Amino acid sequence: MAVTLTERAAKHVSKYIDKRGRGIGLRLGVRTSGCSGMAYKLEFADDVAADDIQFESHGVRVLIDPKSLPYLDGTELDYAREGLNEGFKFNNPNVKDACGCGESFNV
């Protein structure tokens, strides 16, 4: 499987990498946090770590550490605007339950 971006998310990431003036892609991961156990990590990547697993989606490189991949495999990252709010939305088929505030999940 893979981790993918929607076209809208890829355009948003590309725009901000261009605006930053540096970066090779997007780094995704998970960390222990919140009431449901895990939270997403999302940051711009400036380099590739030796153990990174790489995917490409709509021209954007996505980097994931091997420990996070089982939790993210099959995930699609979208960028959505809902009213005055906008941000990334993780469509993760591995999630079994999420907390009410939407900050954490478990598999």
Image (spheres, helix red, strand yellow):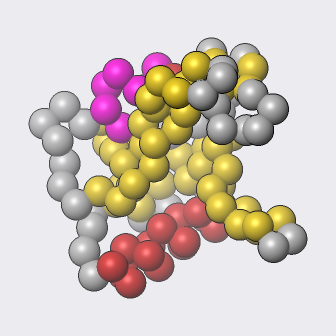
Residue 92 horizontal side relative to residue 20, left or right: right
Query: Which residue is located at x 64 percent, y 67 percent?
Result: 8
Note whether residue 43 is visible. Answer: yes
Query: Which residue is located at x 18 percent, y 55 percent?
Result: 47
| Front residue of 53 and 38 | 38
| Residue 85 lies in quadrant | bottom right
Q: Residue furthest left?
A: 50
Count of marks, rendered view: 0
Query: Which residue is located at x 53 percent, y 65 percent?
Result: 10
Q: Is residue 68 magenta?
A: yes
Note whether residue 2 is visible. Answer: no
Q: Residue furthest front?
A: 35
| Residue 76 lies in quadrant | top right
Please state the horizontal and vertical placement of residue 20, each as a whole percent of the image.
Answer: 33, 79
Query: In the figure, 29 relative to 88: above or below?
Result: above
Magenta stretch, residue numbers: 64-70
| Front residue of 79 and 99 | 99
Residue 36 horizontal side relative to residue 43, left or right: right
Query: Which residue is located at x 41 percent, y 61 percent?
Result: 60
| Front residue of 12 and 98 | 98
Q: Residue furthest right?
A: 83
Instruction: Work out which quarter of the rendered image holds the C terminus and state it.
Output: top right
Query: In the figure, 103 relative to 7: above or below?
Result: above
Q: Is residue 106 magenta?
A: no
